[in-house]
Amino acid sequence: MSAILSLSHVGKSYGNVHALRDVSLSVRQGEVTCVLGDNGAGKSTLIKIVSGLHAHTSGSVLLDDVPVHFGSPREAQANGIATVYQDLALAPLMSVWRNFFLGNELQRGLFRLDIAAMKRICAAELGKMGIVIPDLERPVASLSGGQRQCVAIARAIYFGARVIILDEPTAALGVKQSGVVLRYVVKARDAGLGVIFITHNPHHAYLVGNHFVILKLGRVVLDAHRDELTLEQLTAEMAGGDELTELSHELRGADPGKVVEPASVAPGSVEAPVAAGSAGLAGPAAAGATAEPGGAGGAGAAGGSDRLDGSAS
């Protein structure tokens, strides 16, 4: 099957800074193409080029094998390329149906909105995605994170998207809500769309992806189909590949279970330990991992207490 959208040796420079170099990518109908990479890998720049926000400085972008150069996101959308950004571009205090038709409202006559038709279409399109919202007048802010993502996806499909770009749709969601979104990614694929799934989570990518591309410092370091690699290989490449192996050799002599005894430290000293050990906090966005350092760093806590050297602060 020929590609709906393809990038050939695309590059993007901002002065002397090369955000993308020689990136090639193909998106086919009914497939999920997963683009993975750490922060600064070039994922956002890639989205901006494909969605028409920024122009590429080298290479070519082809839509149905015809070279294109989108001048704006509206032009890209008119050609069937829709982007669902991480912040969703939804108005939190507006109703579900108003968000669905935001900027594309149906009119009845010269100055009247066809509210009944918009509600009917909104309910039908959300129903196709498996979402049932009894009250379409409720504000979008009252929906779960997964439901908001799905409203944005359903909106893009209804307004003629052939290629849909999902910018980190599961980044701020927990496990359950991520599962909801991933199911709708599969529904979009099964509806015949070409899906570009931007993520930093190889486990989420491998659940739905047909084709995987890993970016690192603006370059493609892996380009493989699902039958060419395992989840373990994808995870290893995403985690650093050869660099991670080299780091493992460097840290071979380290004892991760070692706890250093507290020491009196003169101000400005960097050789003695600052604490009796180091602790790692992990969790998805909004899980509270960033709130704990705030309490320890002086931002204050709503309850409980911080202790330093065994005494309450």
Image (spheres, rainbow, N blue to C red):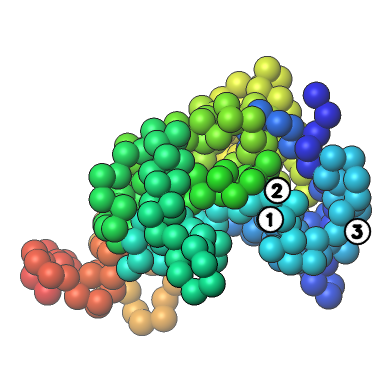
Which class describes the residues within 10 Å of circle 3: few (<14), some (14-19), or many (20+)?
some
Q: Quadrant of the C terminus?
A: bottom left
Please state which of residues 12 and 293 is positioned toward the viewer in this rendering.
12
- Of residues 162 and 241, the one nearer the viewer is 162
Q: What residue is shown with label 3? A: 58
Secondary structure, mark 3, is strand
Q: x, y percentage for residue 39? A: 59, 56
Q: Is residue 311 left or right of residue 285?
A: left
Residue appearing at x 32%, y 39% in the figure: 132
Q: Tell which tag, 3 or 1, sits nearer the viewer.
A: 1
- Amino acid type at mark 1: Gln
Which amino acid, mark 2?
Gly
Q: Residue at x 80, y 24 (%)?
A: 1
Q: Residues within 10 Å of mark 2 (few under 14, many from 20)?
A: some
* Horizontal and vertical percent position of residue 138: 27, 58
Q: Earlier in the sequence, mark 3 or mark 1?
A: 3
Circle 1: element type:
helix
**Left or right relative to 11: residue 189:** left
Task: Name the image quarter holding residue 304.
Answer: bottom left
| Distance CA(mark 2)–CA(mark 3) | 23 Å
Q: Which residue is mark 1?
A: 77
Q: Is residue 182 left or right of residue 47?
A: left
Task: Tell me which amino acid carries mark 3.
Answer: Ser
Residue assigned mark 2? 80
Between 220 and 254, which is closer to the camera in this rendering?
220
